[in-house]
Amino acid sequence: MAATIPTVELSNGVKIPVYGAGTGFLDKDRGLLAPEEACKSVTIALDAGVRHIDAALAYRTQNHIANILRKNFTEGYLERKNIFLTSKVFQPFISILLPSTAMPSNQDSMTPDEVTTIVRNHFEQCIVELGVGYIDLMLLHWPATINSQDVEGNRSRRLAAWKVLEEMYEKGFATAIGVSNFNEIHLTQLKDDGAKIQPMVNQIEASPYVQYDKIIDYCKENNIVVEAYSPLSGGTFLSDPAILSLVRKYKKDAGQICLKYLIQRGYVVVVRSQRRHHSNIDIFDFELSEDDMNKIIGLNKGIEGSSGLTNPYSMA
């Protein structure tokens, strides 16, 4: 029987499942994205009971997701209201991306008006590719180009991009809006610069080895749900003695221990998997003790714990 996954409530009352299936796949041999991998992964996730699918324009998996959902909708297995769809726009261009799925390579010199036009087009492209009438949660993928230190220019471009999400939210094309990879300074600037709506979600890398405490504290103080991507961090901590001691104690595998830890800390988790969704969501029948939670908190290495992903403090 498919699992029932709990939800948490965003600041506007929308409920988001605490476990989502990520769909950004990489062909490590070629160094390119592998969107075709989403076909198997999303199917397995839905079969396991996962109803939160995390996509992005840059991943190029939205057409695959749409085809799978269309089949389920047509055959009556699911209805649109059963699915929570996340997507992302405002992705800086990098070499593994198609230019049409990211911001132009001259993003650092773009005017706010130019940003507005492109982000609006990308938002509409997401809706068309997913084949739905609205997105449950739309995120700004990054706050700026990687390693950019153009403080004032980035602030104005972020605000222009955010205004598009506010516009689409007010029109009903998104039921919630948020950001990804923003640090507490980016979030403060967005508010100070005139955002009418506060981000409801901030999606960042998080795992037992990667805890950005200042970002977490800011989000908690401002009622922003923190969503963890790469929660298993490529398996870098799965053999840690502290984790293995909890594996023996709770009779759960290391991945389940780590996901449970994040969810108990208040995160929503997004897991990219091609075969483990059934196992990963078998985490709602136990609780980690306060002492054991503190043991895992003590593993935090911050930026140094990352498995090589760009960190939220790498751009102004």
Image (cartoon, rainbow, N blue to C red):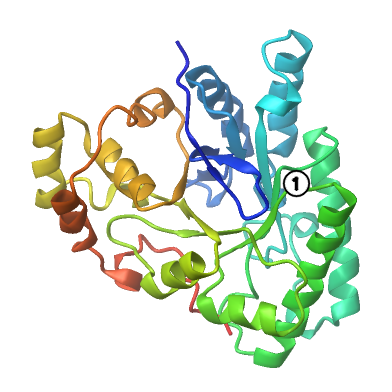
Q: Residue at x 47, y 33 (%)?
A: 6
**In the rendered view, would you say 95 is above or below 228?**
below
Residue type indicated by callout 1 = Thr
Q: Residue at x 45, y 10 (%)?
A: 1
Left or right of 113, for residue 61: left
Residue 166: x %, y % from top left: 81, 62
Q: Could you tell me if residue 247 is visible in this image?
A: yes
Residue 263: x %, y % from top left: 38, 45
**In the rendered view, would you say 173 is above or below 98?**
above
User: Quadrant of residue 34 in the image?
Assistant: top right
Between 142 and 102, the one lying in front of the other is: 142
Residue tagged 1 = 175
Left or right of 51, for residue 111: right
Q: Could you tell me if residue 106 is visible in this image?
A: no
Left or right of 112, for residue 211: left
Residue 167: x %, y % from top left: 87, 61
SS for callout 1: loop
Q: Residue at x 82, y 32 (%)?
A: 131
Residue 139: x %, y % from top left: 67, 57
Between 294 and 240, the one lying in front of the other is: 294
Classify 10 Å Cα crowding around label 1: few (below 14), some (14-19), many (20 and above).
some
The quarter of the picture where the C terminus appears is: bottom right
